[in-house]
Amino acid sequence: MGILSRASYVVRSKVNSLLNRAEDPTESLDYSYEQMRDELQDVKQGIADLTTQKKRLEIQKRRLEDNVENHNDQAREAVRQDRDDLARQALEKKQAKMGQIEELEGQIADLQATQDDLVDKKNELQGRIEEFRTKKETMKARYEAAEASTRVSEAMSGVGDEMGDVTRSIERAEEQTDEMEARSEAMDELADTGAFDDAVSDKDNIDRELETGRSNREIDTELETLKSEVGGSGGDGSGSEDADADADADVSDANAGTADVDVSDTEVEAELEELKDDEE
């Protein structure tokens, strides 16, 4: 097989495949039914034309028969008048007309036979059309039922194009939801660890720890005050001692936090003394 032949075969096969996919069986059946009805209409029109032609010949035959009778009367009248020559002419014309009548009768018989044959074919074709119409409606009903069943099955199994799109949309929505939930959890975790506070605040860890210590001292002081008011004067001394102990502990924590700073011990000690003086 040559290259051109193979190319032509491939093109024909592709076109045939496209036509098969584009073809709707119900439309094909309806088109075939309409074609058969058109053929039946052509046959009926042919029968009508043939019948018209036959009737025209029959009319012509009747006129010739009238002429034959007329020539008979002419011949009798010529004989009564002893005009044999006129009688002979009338009989000759009569014989000619009778020959034409015989010819017309043959044509009319042929037309009648053709008409009868066409009528039989018309009846047969009409029967086939009715049978095809019944089969057509049955096939259309079966095809539409199968098509509906296929759509339902595809919808139930998710095989169809539309259900495939729906499935992919659900999967994308689930992925985006998971990503959003993970992002939300990450933001909450960062907020709990103070990462956002570090980013927006100028305070370092030492400042935050000192603030926490001061808050704790204030709470402890207020607590001891309440205890003193409730418990009497004996509790004042112990409360003050506890507050001083908490203050010392906070200062110790501050000292531990400043150990990481790259400064000399003398400067740290001097700054601590100043802080203690301020507290007193």
Image: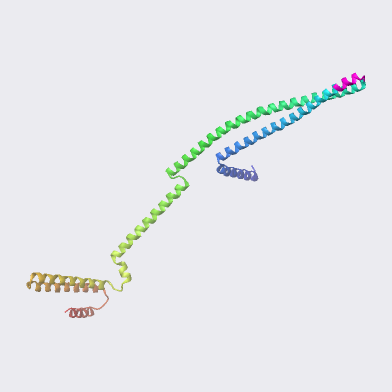
Residue 211 image offset from top left, x and y in percent:
23, 72
Residue 100 visible in this rendered orientation of the protein: no
Vertical position of residue 35 compared to residue 59: above or below = below
Quadrant containing the N terminus is: top right
Quadrant of residue 59 within the rendered picture: top right
State the residue at coordinates (13%, 70%): 226
Residue 48 image offset from top left, x and y in percent:
69, 32
Q: How many marks?
A: 0
Quadrant of residue 41 within the rendered picture: top right
The foreground one among 125 and 163 is 125
State the residue at coordinates (34%, 58%): 182
Vertical position of residue 54 compared to residue 31: above or below = above
Look at the image and say whether residue 173 sits in the magenta stretch: no
Residue 275 visible in this rendered orientation of the protein: yes
Residue 256 image offset from top left, x and y in percent:
22, 72
The foreground one among 42 and 199 is 42
What segment is highlighted magenta in the picture?
A: 73-82
Quadrant containing the C terminus is: bottom left
Q: Is residue 84 left or right of residue 2?
A: right
Vertical position of residue 160 compared to residue 58: above or below = below
The foreground one among 201 and 111 is 111
Q: Chief secondary structure of the magenta span?
A: helix
Q: Is residue 34 left or right of residue 65?
A: left
State the residue at coordinates (45%, 50%): 165
Quadrant of residue 198 within the rendered picture: bottom left
Vertical position of residue 81 compared to residue 220: above or below = above
Residue 36 image offset from top left, x and y in percent:
62, 35
| Colour style of the rendered protein structure | rainbow
State the residue at coordinates (91%, 23%): 86
